[in-house]
Image: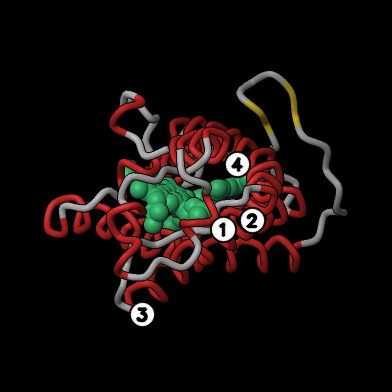
Amino acid sequence: MATPESLSDPGPEDMELNQRLTYEPAQKFFHWAMAIVVLSAIALGLWSSFLVPGDPLRKALLDLHKSFGFTAAALILPRIICRLMSRASVGQPEPNRLFRLAAHGTHFGLYALMILMPVTGYLFSAAGGYSLPWFGLFHWPRLVDESKAMSLAGKWLHDKGAWLIYAAVSAHILAVIWHSVFRRDDVLWRMLPDWRSDDETPD
Ligand code: HEM
Ligand code: HEM
């Protein structure tokens, strides 16, 4: 398998090689675990926003939403450490500078939102005196005093952040579809488990 350094700054001559390189297994694990957790949190948060406060279903959805949100919070630090320790840089097989910048920007934005959303959700709920459950197993500690102002600030940021994460995740998934359907390159495969046999991968 080629060294991940070759992913860092691909020129056109590296295209063929880059198209066969993949992310490291730990990065793949964190990517897909986080994708499931964040997409679940988004779906539950969005669903709950269509229900009126006081509806028992809204409370149940939000309890589950918070549990996924806390799971994202627990995963993000090990994920970032793993990303920083990995020798592989983002490694876009994208020769167009503007598209490469857009991909880097979206990835950076997604990392920022994976920190911002749990933090603002926590401030909103903890300072508002609301529950902090984790899948019915235990409650997370309340590290801040109850404060209406802090809770409202957390809610405002969480609600605005929700729009940003809808946009960033949609752009991210549409970009992957565009690569797979129109460019027909290997971007999606780089993030999937490597099922290819040894003689298909470069040494
Ligand atoms: C990755 C983590 C998270 C994501 C992506 C996320 C996303 C969302 C989204 C999309 C909504 C719907 C926004 C709307 O009302 O239009 C929402 C609402 C909400 N979230 Fe989160 N959230 C996360 C973590 C958390 C955490 C950790 C908590 C609390 C401990 C939390 C508490 C809430 C609450 C209480 C609402 C209802 C907001 C309202 O009534 O306006 N969230 N979240
Ligand atoms: C069905 C959903 C998803 C698919 C198919 C998908 C696919 C991919 C692929 C193929 C890459 C590699 C891109 C490249 O090398 O240029 C990637 C990277 C990335 N994805 Fe996703 N993704 C999905 C959902 C998500 C979600 C929900 C998040 C976070 C909220 C996310 C965050 C990221 C980040 C931060 C990277 C950059 C990884 C790094 O370089 O450290 N993805 N994704």
Q: Is residue 116 left or right of residue 201?
A: right
Disc 1 to disc 2: CB gap under 8 Å: yes
Which label number is shown at residue 111? 1
Disc 4 to disc 2: CB gap under 8 Å: no
Q: Is mark 4 within 8 Å of ligand 1?
A: yes
Mark 1 or 3: the one toward you: 3
Which label number is shown at residue 97? 3
Q: CA distance from mark 2 to mark 3?
A: 27 Å
- Of label 4 and label 3, which has the lower sequence position? 4
Q: Vertically, is 127 above or below 82?
A: below
Residue under label 4: 72
Residue in the image at 59% along x and 67% along y: 157
Residue in the image at 22% along x and 56% along y: 179
- Of label 1 and label 3, which has the lower sequence position? 3
Q: Callout 3: 10 Å neighbours few (<14), some, many (20+)? A: few
Residue in the image at 70% along x and 37% along y: 132
